[in-house]
Image (tube, rainbow, N blue to C red):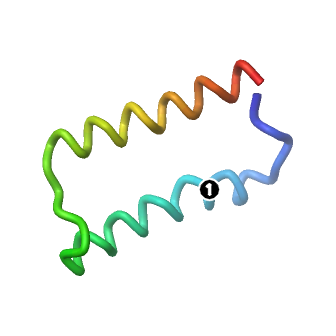
Amino acid sequence: MFRPLPSMALICTVYGPLKMFAKMMQESELLYWLELEEELTDSFWNAIRLQGVC
């Protein structure tokens, strides 16, 4: 379950990593490919599901 945090704190926990992925791709430190997007999506949803178990 999500902790009782202010909504802006929750937005930052999502926005921060997405911003870093975009920056790394823009600087060619990380290359985009469809499988990467699928793996990241699965990882994010798994993290959300694990929150419900704890």
Q: How far from the left and from the top, in percent, is residue 43?
A: 44, 36
Please, is residue 8 above or below residue 28 in the view?
Answer: above
Q: Characterize the local packing of mark 1: few (<14), some (14-19) or many (20 or more) Cα atoms within 10 angstroms.
A: few
When the figure is inspected, residue 27 is found, relative to residue 3, above or below; the finding is: below
Is 42 left or right of 30, judged from the image as shown? right
Kind of element beneath mark 1? helix
In the rendered image, which quarter contains the C terminus? top right
Left or right relative to 48: residue 25:
left
Instruction: Judge from the rendering whether residue 10 lies leftward or rightward of residue 45; answer left or right.
Output: right
Given the image, on which type of amino acid does mark 1 rest?
A: Thr
> Dividing the image into 4 quarters, which one contains the N terminus?
top right
Q: Quadrant of residue 2?
A: top right
Query: Which residue is label 1 attached to?
Result: 13
Which residue is farthest front? 29
What residue is at 42 percent from the left and 67 percent from the top? Answer: 19
- Name the residue: 42% across, 59% down: 18
Q: Could you tell me residue 29's position as x and y percent?
A: 24, 74
Q: Which percent across, then down, holds residue 40?
A: 36, 42
Image vertical order of residue 20 relative to residue 40, above or below? below
- Taking 26 as reference, is 33 left or right? left
Q: Residue 16: x percent and y percent?
A: 53, 64
